[in-house]
Image (cartoon, rainbow, N blue to C red):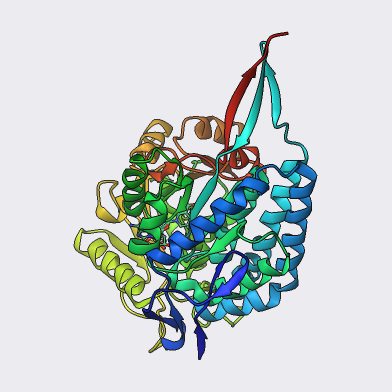
Amino acid sequence: MQIIDRIYIDGEFVKPHGDEYFDLFNPATEQVIGRVLLADAQDARDAIAAAKRAFAAFSRTGKSERIDMLKRLHAAVVAREDELYEAITEEYGAPVSRGRWMARHASDVLAGAAKVLEDYPFTRRAGMADVVMQPLGVAGLITPWNSDAGFICGKLAAALAAGCTAVIKPSEMSAIQTRVITEALHEAGLPPGVFNIVTGRGDTVGAEISSHRDVAKLSFTGSTAVGKTILRTAASTLKRVTLELGGKSPVVVLDDANFEEVVPLVIQAGFMNSGQACIAGTRILVPQNRLAEFESRLRDEVARTHSGDPRDPQTSIGPMVSQKQWERVQRYIRIGIDEGARLIAGGEGRPDGLQTGWFVRPTVFSDVRNDMTIAREEIFGPVLSILTYRDIEEAISIANDTDYGLQAYVFSADTKRAREVASRIEAGRVLVNTLAHEPAAPFGGFKQSGIGREYGTYGLEAFLEPKAVIAAA
Ligand code: NAD
């Protein structure tokens, strides 16, 4: 049983002012494995004050100094990678390969930001003006539980690269992972106050960060509902806001696709991160005249998909993060059945042989209409919908008929055709015949999937404001 009773303010591990303890669970066993003492609004204010003090000097550091700091942070996180992996498995339940990827991703994003910074020109000419890209100030970084260390490090890396200081509010459900990552980041020996980490509730610590006048920038990853609250709160002080929110990503399978190659990719896209992924491909669009063939291949593929013990290398779907999340997913499966969709794999309850743990059966519905709840709302679990289309026009129309627009996938034997379809899809990223991640490219959503972009130069500029200096010759 781990007791976590320290937050990180001004370069030190301090006891929070808050007095509420929150239980931490192993989602594979439903056992309480730790307790975290939560920060409160006073702690958030202390962290913001520390970040504000540090900003004066940090914002004037040069590129090479900041690159050096990012490299030190990178090395420090690499050094704790195994411990981080253990925490991810125990507290989040990520299957082996996903957990390993997540633990590595946390350090990769720090190295990535150092690389972006190397080539980034902070000053450009516009007519007779020098346009200087200036750091915005104190950045509030609010992150979810579905990739704790990756989001903390990714947002922090971009903020620091820009010359901003940071107050980070991770999800209260990921406190063990946050402890490992905080200790790692501390080892890098950055000046006190440059980053502060306060684990607490969203409606206290998160709300304080979103409303505080000394926070200039908010970068939030989480649900669309909370994103809207944050945007409203931030409006009163006109903070710059980046919102990375939910998704209901279409997977457009064109009529010439080779199902043998494509179906395994479709399943990976849908069930990635145990289905708890904002970019999961959850609406699978299949040509009507090949539906039976597609369903048959997909059934075989799902039958090979193992949902269970995250430490078993055969497992590709681990447990849902919490009982609440498990119940939410179960509720959506029931809604799908009640709305008349046809189950072709999975269904309600746990996978066979499992009595405990927040495990879900890998579930696929067919005969789904795009106006059904399961096609419109983000489920955030391994539950997929197959919809059919008659021609490409209809496929594109269904793909775009959603409130979301984070990511989309197109599969075809003809890349040119697939690219044409991709060009008409309203989403921040479209993956054509691949599931690859490109860290140099922007990431973020159209429509209600968010505002702004992360990663690469776009992510860096989200923490910068242009200032034009026009001087007499
Ligand atoms: P959530 O919105 O409930 O919480 C996210 C964070 O916001 C947490 O740290 C939470 O404590 C905090 N928060 C809650 N209320 C707040 C408030 N009033 N003010 C300030 N902060 C507040 O989301 P979650 O359940 O942790 O994560 C799942 C959601 O995140 C899904 O909807 C998923 O799609 C989304 N997500 C999006 C991306 C992306 O990059 N677009 C990536 C991962 C997850």
* Furthest residue in direction left, as rendered: 338
Instruction: Decide if residue 313 is on the left or right side of residue 236.
Output: right
Find residue 98 and report its horizontal and vertical position in percent.
60, 68
Quadrant of ligand 1 in image: bottom left
Find residue 433 and report its horizontal and vertical position in percent.
60, 45
Residue at x-position 54% and y-position 81%: 90
Is residue 95 placed above or below 221 in the rendered structure? below
Residue at x-position 30% and y-position 68%: 328
Residue 266 or 29: which is nearer the viewer? 29
The answer to whether residue 233 shows anywhere in this view is yes
Answer with the quarter of the image where residue 321 lies.
bottom left
Residue 366 or 245: which is nearer the viewer? 245
Find residue 463 and report its horizontal and vertical position in percent.
57, 41
Is residue 283 placed above or below 442 in the rendered structure? below
Answer with the quarter of the image where residue 351 lies.
bottom left
Find residue 398 and report its horizontal and vertical position in percent.
35, 39
Total numbered circles:
0
Q: Quarter of the image containing the C terminus? A: top right
The answer to whether residue 256 shows anywhere in this view is no
Residue at x-position 59% and y-position 64%: 10
Instruction: Decide if residue 433 is on the left or right side of residue 175.
Output: right
Is residue 354 placed above or below 396 in the rendered structure? below
Is residue 316 placed above or below 409 in the rendered structure? below
Residue 141 or 107: which is nearer the viewer? 141
